[in-house]
Image (cartoon, helix red, strand yellow):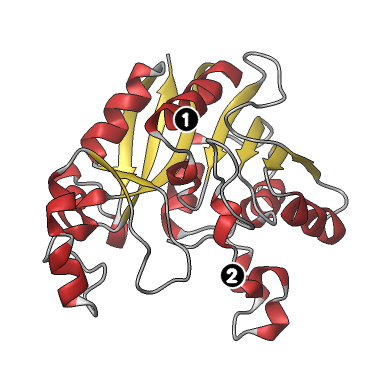
Amino acid sequence: MFADDSLGQPIGAHAPASTATPHYYLFPSSQTVDECSVYCLWPEEKYLIEKYFHPGRRVADLACGMGRTTLRLHELGFTVAASDISAALIEAARSRFPYLDFKVGSFTSVDAPDTSFDNVLISANAIDFAYPLTQRIVALREAARILKPGGTFLYSAHNLKAFLPYSPRYWRRPLWKLRHTLRAFRAVAPTLPDPYEDNNWGLYATPEEIIRHTEQAGFHFLEMRGMQMSGSRWLNGLTSIYIHYAFRRL
């Protein structure tokens, strides 16, 4: 959905969500977006963080962008280490929050020892910008590597079923949507340029595939939250544009 961790063009196999950072994330005053709408947790994030993260524990905030979730996690009492592949976004985050721990880094190669975090978060559907599929799997395994056994991994991802005719995504572009409906019947597929955005590329997958790949990386699926805070796998799989997932490290 929102690309608050993206700047520049794809580099190599790993293209971070920072590839399409809207101008207002770097210069909020230039658009009708206030900072409260940028530096906040999405409802699904808030629900899952309150349920599975415990204040005082260490959290790795990967693909953090300008620190939207980093700031809120810090304010909630977590010890947060944040990273993003975009040096420009990290510089902006450091200038705004010099008291927080930001560094440049990729979620496919995290600069942290094994089992060094209690929780890992990849927000804003950033995982979709690790492609091809082998890179997504690398990112999932990195999350497992740095998590302690029993630790919680939260992340969100676009739902490939958003291309189905009755999904709310792209409803204002019915002909565009109809031309690409067959993509929704795949398990995994690279996206096409979004008709609403200048650059919205990445790797979409069905919820079943997302859960399967994550469990193969060493996790146990806990729950999901989709649009309207639904926890139904059936309903989310058919209608949610993006879904937030919670997993526990085995």
Judge the density around disc 2: few (<14), some (14-19), many (≥20) Cα neighbours within 10 Å. some
Of label 1 and label 2, which has the lower sequence position?
2
Any mark on residue 60, and which? none
Residue at the outermost front position: 12
Provide the residue designation for mark 2: 22
Measure how far apart labels 1 and 2 are at the Cα level.
24 Å
Q: Which residue is drawn at 59% across and 86% down?
A: 32
Q: Residue at x 42, y 55 (%)?
A: 201
Could you tell me which quadrant the N terminus lies in?
bottom left
Q: Residue at x 23, y 42 (%)?
A: 206
Q: In this view, does 229 lie above or below 13?
A: below
Could you tell me which quadrant the C terminus lies in?
top left
Element under disc 1: helix
Q: 72 or 12, which lies in front?
A: 12
Inspect the image, locate mark 1, and give the three-letter code of the amino acid beneath it.
Answer: Gln
Q: Residue at x 34, y 17 (%)?
A: 216
Say which quarter of the image contains residue 30. Answer: bottom right
Residue 204 percent location from the top left of the image: 32, 46
Q: 110 or 235, which lies in front?
A: 110
Residue 15 percent location from the top left of the image: 54, 44
Element under disc 2: loop
Judge the density around disc 1: few (<14), some (14-19), many (≥20) Cα neighbours within 10 Å. some
Q: 55 or 89, which lies in front?
A: 89
Provide the residue designation for mark 1: 135
Say which quarter of the image contains residue 119. Answer: top right
Q: 78 or 200, which lies in front?
A: 200
Inspect the image, locate mark 2, and give the three-letter code of the amino acid beneath it.
Answer: Pro
